[in-house]
Amino acid sequence: MFNKLFDPHFAFSTLLDGYDLSGVHYFACLFGAIMAIYVMKLWDHGSVTLNGDCVIAQWTRRIALLLLTLSMLWSLAYSTQKGWQPWPPDLFALIGVDIFLASTILVAFKRNRALG
């Protein structure tokens, strides 16, 4: 498998062909949607927000997180209904968003613990 990576004629997009990635997509979408709602709650309670945040920034974040949640759930519903096999770049983007949201939650927990 690794020898193929160094072949100059190898198409990287074919690396994951033959694998069913729908389970990874399902988990990444569902877990990400739940985390996005939780991060929205943390921002509303001030666990992540800095004291100087203006109202426009707060509402922009809320709208962005709502759109993120809806897009993840819509992608999950679409892939389930259509039997759609997710593209690997989409999965990497979803996993990246999930990691970002998880790190935001972790920072909020550490900040709350430090403040006591």
Image (cartoon, rainbow, N blue to C red):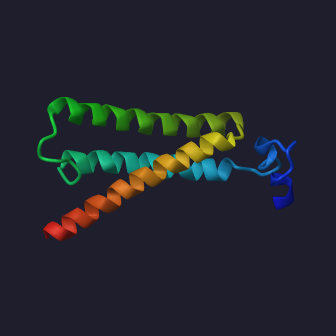
Question: Residue drawn at (28%, 31%), measured in percent from left and top?
Answer: 60
Give residue 56's quadrant in the image: top left
Question: Residue drawn at (63%, 52%), measured in percent from left and top?
Answer: 24
**Which sits in the foreground, 69 or 50?**
50
Q: Is residue 84 left or right of residue 53?
A: right
Q: Quadrant of the N terminus?
A: bottom right
**Which sits in the foreground, 97 or 9?**
9
Q: Position of residue 64 (x, y in %)?
A: 36, 33
Q: Is residue 106 left or right of residue 32?
A: left
Image position of 14 with respect to 71: above or below? below
Q: Quadrant of the C terminus?
A: bottom left
Q: Is residue 104 left or right of residue 82?
A: left
Q: Is residue 84 left or right of residue 15?
A: left
**Which sits in the foreground, 109 or 74?**
109
**Which sits in the foreground, 36 or 76?**
36
Q: Position of residue 73 (x, y in %)?
A: 50, 39
- Total marks placed: 0
Please say whether residue 1 is visible from this viewpoint: no
Give residue 111's quadrant in the image: bottom left
Please say whether residue 48 is visible from this viewpoint: yes
Give residue 57's quadrant in the image: top left
Q: Position of residue 20 (x, y in %)?
A: 75, 50
Image position of 100 with respect to 115: above or below? above
Q: Position of residue 83 (x, y in %)?
A: 72, 38
